[in-house]
Amino acid sequence: MAPTQANAAFVWRQFIDLGRSNSKKSKRYRCRHCQKDFAATSVGRPKEHLAACEKWQAKQRQERQAQDNAGYLPSYSEAIQKKITEVGIQHISQDESHSYAYDAAAAVIAGGRPFSLFESRRWRYFFTRIKPGWKPPSRAAITRILPDFYPGWRSIQFNSIQSQIWWTKDQPLNRASVHVP
């Protein structure tokens, strides 16, 4: 997952800035949990370290267990932070993200669900657990996808209806009608 401002800030709070030993070298950092020192110029290495740090993982497991016992549902950002530490960095391409958004919008449209379906906290938490690098489409995004999706879906539904026995076409007036027995 590409680091965002909030995720980067969360990761950096887990480290102590030791500064530079030489102006030509990278800054050095110390993990607040296991006291390991290393150099880093971006948030990537610290994220990878947190994903592998045994003391950090133990602390996270203990906090999650306490929250689970209390029946607590974590926020969207907490779920992302949890996933970062469990699996490290997961990158998602823009094409893959658009493909997921199109499929999600198609499911909403074809299922007759409200366009705001994925905006609820629980849906966002659910999708974060499955694919942390992907953000479900908003109602505005689904509205933008609708013109691309609807013509194909309409023709599939129309062909399905026409193939039914009870569908006839009134030849003299050239209009479709439904005969109800």
Image (cartoon, rainbow, N blue to C red):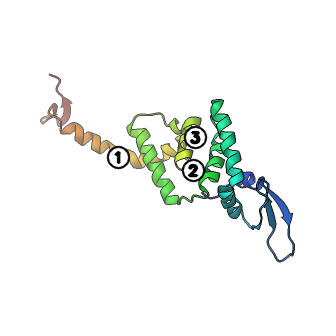
Residue designated by label 1: 151
Q: Nearer the viewer, residue 139 or 97?
A: 97
Residue 103 falls left or right of residue 134: left
Whether label 1 touches label 3, CB < 8 Å: no
Dot 2: within a 10 Å radius of its alpha carbon, few (fewer than 14), some, or many (20 or more) residues? many
Q: Residue flagged by tag 1: what amino acid is it?
A: Pro
Image coordinates of residue 147 in percent, x first then y, are 42, 47
Residue designated by label 3: 125
Q: Residue furthest bottom?
A: 24
Q: Residue flagged by tag 2: what amino acid is it?
A: Pro
Residue at horizontal 39%, vertical 36%? Answer: 111
Q: Nearer the viewer, residue 34 or 110?
A: 34
Residue at horizontal 51%, vertical 54%? Answer: 97
Could you tell me if residue 13 is visible in this image? yes
Image coordinates of residue 9 in percent, x first then y, are 75, 53
Give the quadrant of residue 173.
top left
Residue designated by label 2: 132
Q: Residue flagged by tag 3: what amino acid is it?
A: Tyr
